[in-house]
Image (cartoon, coloured by chain):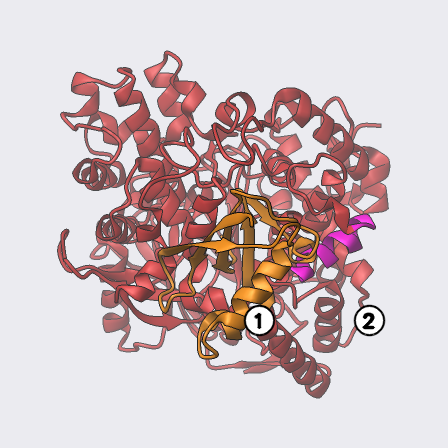
């Protein structure tokens, strides 16, 4: 079936009753929230009331490909996965690449909203218009790779697209992920545990339809122009050659590389866990792109020495190299490749997995985890065998330590006690990604106010480093002067964060990859608005697009406010706020409470949120046309 | 004549690893002057001679130098300069 791209539909699935039904998205909502992340946020706010247990049947798990996903718009294959997050008890949105989003679109479904809990394991099979729940008992307990293979075999079609969980999601690990298209992960915050709590092993789609664009020729021409511009961006080639882990050598050289559970900012041998090394030394076996992406930053590797068996897997990406490598004191290429493979197969978020292990290693070295609590593991930094074993035990919740760490560093530190909470690299219950928020103040602010917890994948303000001409031009556009392209400055940080928030929300809603908008810069609010307009046959300006982005960000804030989230929750891990950078050009930098308070004051004021609490003001919600939806939480 | 240490990453036929050289610079020379001289003296087939400057990361004494500041960054005796092929993303 070929359908108009603007005629969006929600596929609702109640796993408790087995009921499956469809509904239309109102055109007005599509224009206000743009699609993907925006519509997901609206559905979550409307349908998941305050206080719902994230792992209970009343939580909603929503898959929402971007509105332009499935078209030729460059790097537009992203899908937003949204639910109430089990790690934080707050709003959770994860953006994931791969090809499942486009397949859902071609099958005729723009959103899949799943609630309830099946009595036994099932998978959701979407074969164009035919949708059914099928028994998945035979897949329960299997790793993501094997389960994916069996699903394709069972359906007799190797071209289906699959999103599924591994044992970690089945066991309710609070940082379990959902794997899309074999090698893409909806990682952060425990969306995999939400899926597991519903006894839903997989979502499988086959779509043979298509999308009709209102102004197809103009759209294709602009998409092509934008794709060409993207390929000429200064950083695009590096992403293709080395993936995100190409940043390792520079981070180490600048002494900005998180290592030993963020107690240090460099590590000897960092090059061995870099994308460049994988290429030079023959680990790299291939590259792949997500849907409609010409950058193709996804890489595949194969072990060489086979120190931990023959390993074939994707990545590893920068955050994997940092979290499962440097943060745990490991610079062994084979060990990180193996750790990454285990996490992907068990269905674990590599960032949190690495950080719960590095927290355990520091706690062990300081004598707070010992004896029986360590389950006979020697947890010194750099101990690869212990790390590999711990990944398995966490995923299976095996033993005292595995079960403890499966709940994340916040809960683990509460259990272990002493000062261990000080080196738990988390806030709101989510482990921080391995970016140093002491010496990059936009990052610090963005991480602190991130509704899902401190990480870079909601609002990465890469431009504040001013490395490239494009980055400096963007900072000038936002602040009026490129002199603000200095990451340690405090001035204008709230403007920089605000712009990036709005842009990220809009690009997520349309399905664009953040690498195309805010790491490379060829996809921008102007051409996003034009592409949206041409696709739907409406007139949307760049300003309106960014305003819609702000509406999404504000709605997400409202969700957290309704759950009790306040200003005091907008913070960074203790170490980032209290232990200065130990060496390098940023030596002495820290984002202490006073600094953060200044940043938050300005940020709340710019948002129109109450300074003392961080709650949106009524007039703010009115100006964003949100009072009907969430006016009940506003302050006057 | 002041001497500076130059570390190259990604320019010696491999993407990874560092190659270190000592270079003489004239008194008051800028980072741009050093960069131009290194490019001109490189084999035309070397990446160093061919690369688009936008794809180079400049670091002096552990601090990032933006492309716009390369011209105005003076070099002193004992400075450490790192030239890396730019990589982005995280």
Q: Is residue A245 left or right of residue A568?
A: left
Pick out the residue farthest to the top. A418
Q: Which of marks 2 and 1 is in front?
A: 1
**Looking at the image, which residue is at 72% across and 70% down?**
A527
Pick the quarter of the image with the N terminus of chain A. bottom right
Which numbered dot is residue A82? none
Residue A628 is one of the magenta-drawn residues? no
Secondary structure at badge 2 equals loop
Q: Give the range drawn in magenta.
A: A468-481
| Mark 2 to mark 1 CA distance (whole Å) | 38 Å
Q: Chain for mark 1?
A: B
Rendered colour, chain A: red
Is A170 left or right of A100, judged from the image as shown?
left
Q: Mark 1 points at which residue?
A: B52
Colour used to depict chain B in the structure image: orange
Chain letter for mark 2, please. A
Q: Which residue is labeled 2 in the image?
A: A539
Nearest the eye: A415 or A287: A287
Q: Is-magenta flag for residue A469? A: yes
Q: Nearer the viewer, residue A272 or A592?
A: A272
- Could you say where residue A199 lies in the image, as x and y percent from the top left? 34, 48
Local secondary structure at mark 1: loop
Residue at figure coordinates x 37%, y 42% from the top left: A323
């Amino acid at each position: 079936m070929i359908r108009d791209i603007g005629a969006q539909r929600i596929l609702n699935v109640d796993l408790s009753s087995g009921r499956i039904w469809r509904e239309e998205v109102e055109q007005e909502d599509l224009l206000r929230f743009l699609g993907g992340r925006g519509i997901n946020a609206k559905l979550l706010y409307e349908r998941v009331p305050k206080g719902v247990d994230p792992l209970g049947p009343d939580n909603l798990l929503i898959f929402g490909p971007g509105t332009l996903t499935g078209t030729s718009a460059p790097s537009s294959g992203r899908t937003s996965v949204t639910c109430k997050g089990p790690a934080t008890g707050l709003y959770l949105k994860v953006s994931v690449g791969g090809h499942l989003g486009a397949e859902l679109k071609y099958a005729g479904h723009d959103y899949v909203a799943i609630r309830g809990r099946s009595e036994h394991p099932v998978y959701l099979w979407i074969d164009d218009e035919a949708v059914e729940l099928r028994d998945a008992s035979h897949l329960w307990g299997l790793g993501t790779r094997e389960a994916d293979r069996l699903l394709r075999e069972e359906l007799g079609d190797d071209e289906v697209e699959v999103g599924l969980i591994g044992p970690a999601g089945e066991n309710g690990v609070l940082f379990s992920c959902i794997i899309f298209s074999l090698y893409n992960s909806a990682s952060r915050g425990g969306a995999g545990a939400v899926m597991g709590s519903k006894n839903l092993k997989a979502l499988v789609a086959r779509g043979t339809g298509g999308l009709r664009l209102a102004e197809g020729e103009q759209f294709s021409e602009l998409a092509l122009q934008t794709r060409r511009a993207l390929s000429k961006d200064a950083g695009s080639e590096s992403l293709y050659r080395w993936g995100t882990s190409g940043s390792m050598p520079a981070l180490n050289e600048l002494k900005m590389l998180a290592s030993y559970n963020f107690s240090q900012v460099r590590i000897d041998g960092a090059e061995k866990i870099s994308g460049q090394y994988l290429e030079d030394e023959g680990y790299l076996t291939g590259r792949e792109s997500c849907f409609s992406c010409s950058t193709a930053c996804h890489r595949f590797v194969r072990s060489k020495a086979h120190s931990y068996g023959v390993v074939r897997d994707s990545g590893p990406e920068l955050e994997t190299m940092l979290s499962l490598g440097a943060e745990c004191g490991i610079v062994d290429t084979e060990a990180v490749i193996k750790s990454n493979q285990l996490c992907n197969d068990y269905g674990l978020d590599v960032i949190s997995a690495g950080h719960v292990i590095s927290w355990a290693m520091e706690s062990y070295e300081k004598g707070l985890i010992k004896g029986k609590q360590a389950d006979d593991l020697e947890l010194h930094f750099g101990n690869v065998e212990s790390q590999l074993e711990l990944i398995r035990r966490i995923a299976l919740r095996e033993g005292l330590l595995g079960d403890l760490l499966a709940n994340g560093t916040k809960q683990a530190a509460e259990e272990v006690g002493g000062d261990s909470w000080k080196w738990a690299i988390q806030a709101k219950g989510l482990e921080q990604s391995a970016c140093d928020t002491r010496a990059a103040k936009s990052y610090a602010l963005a991480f602190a106010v991130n509704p899902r917890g401190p990480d870079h994948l909601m609002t990465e303000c890469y431009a504040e480093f001013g490395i490239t001409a494009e980055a400096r031009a963007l900072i000038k556009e936002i602040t009026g002067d490129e002199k603000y392209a200095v990451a340690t400055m405090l001035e204008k940080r709230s403007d920089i964060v605000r712009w990036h928030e709005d842009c990220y929300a809009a690009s997520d809603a349309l399905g664009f990859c953040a690498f195309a908008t805010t790491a490379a810069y060829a996809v921008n609010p102007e051409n996003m608005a034009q592409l949206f307009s041409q696709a739907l046959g409406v007139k949307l300006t760049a300003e309106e697009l960014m305003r819609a982005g702000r509406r999404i960000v504000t709605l997400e804030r409202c969700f957290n406010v309704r759950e009790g989230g306040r200003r005091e929750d907008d913070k960074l891990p203790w170490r980032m706020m209290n232990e200065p950078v130990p060496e390098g050009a940023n030596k002495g930098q820290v984002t202490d409470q006073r600094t953060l308070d200044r940043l938050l004051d300005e940020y709340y004021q710019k948002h129109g949120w109450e300074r003392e609490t961080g709650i949106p003001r009524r007039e703010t919600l009115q100006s964003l046309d949100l009072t009907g939806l969430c006016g009940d939480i506003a302050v006057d | 004549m002041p001497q500076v240490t130059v570390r190259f990453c990604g320019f010696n036929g491999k993407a990874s690893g560092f190659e270190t050289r000592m270079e003489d610079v004239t008194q008051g020379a800028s980072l741009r002057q050093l960069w131009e001289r290194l490019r001109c003296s490189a084999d035309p087939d070397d990446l160093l001679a061919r690369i688009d400057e936008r794809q180079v990361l400049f670091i002096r004494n552990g601090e990032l130098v933006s492309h716009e500041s390369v011209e105005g960054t003076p070099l002193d005796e004992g400075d450490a300069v790192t030239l890396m092929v730019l990589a982005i993303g995280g």
